[in-house]
Image (spheres, rainbow, N blue to C red):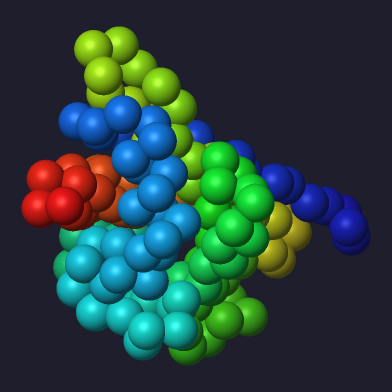
Amino acid sequence: MPGLRRVTEIEVSAPVGCEEGAVNRALHVYPARVLELAFGGASGTGEALARLRLGRLGGLGVRALVELRTPTAHERTAPIALRWRARRGAALFPVMEATLRARPASAGGSVLVFSGRYLVPFGLVGIVADQLIGARGARATAHRFVADVARVIDALVEVA
């Protein structure tokens, strides 16, 4: 079965206690700071190290480099582009390409939405591994990431 490929798509969201415009400002004006606070450390270059947890094996994880690209000044409502890749053994793991954006919600709040996708490596073996543990680990990591970013944005907006 050469050429067997599968793309896994993930979309998760978390509520934010401030309006969409405030979320977009935080994401676009302070993206490296948001990543730094969400992950507990960043390089100041738009990259951060994350620990990706593999499913229920909470102690087993992969250190990943998260890179971001912020839109230009005239694209204030455009999503933030993210790229997650394993820091070591990168050939063994897929690269997640994703976007992070704010959407309006009721009562003056908003929702932070992560939409990502990755190509599962290693054909049939990789697809089976992704179904058993990889996709769940990626989804759980994305949930934690979005919740952490939402918490940081809430705190930043509260201070401002």
Q: Residue furthest top?
A: 106
Is 134 placed above or below 60 here? above
* Image quarter in which the N terminus is found: bottom right
Q: Residue furthest right?
A: 2
Q: Residue at x 41, y 22 (%)?
A: 104
Question: Is 5 in front, or is 117?
Answer: 117
The structure residue drawn at horizontal position 63% and vertical position 49%, both measured from the top left corner, is 75
Relative to 110, 117 lies left or right = right
Residue 26 on image: x %, y %: 34, 52
Residue 129 visible: no
Q: Is residue 25 above or below residue 93?
A: above
Nearer to the camera, 127 or 85: 85
Work out whether residue 149 or residue 58 is closer to the camera in this orientation and state it.
149
Query: What is the total number of numbered labels drawn onto the structure image?
Result: 0
Which residue occupies 58% across, 76% down? Answer: 92
Query: Which is more toward the observer, 54 or 80?
Result: 80
Asked if 65 appears above or below 96 in the picture, the reply is below
- Quadrant for residue 109, please give it: top left
Whether residue 40 is visible: yes
Q: From what the image shows, is residue 65 above or below residue 146? A: below
Residue at figure coordinates x 24%, y 49% from the top left: 153
130 left or right, relative to 143? right
Q: Residue 159, how many percent across, how many down?
A: 10, 53
Residue 105 image position (x, y, % from top left):
35, 17
Residue 90 placement (x, y as % from top left) = 57, 81
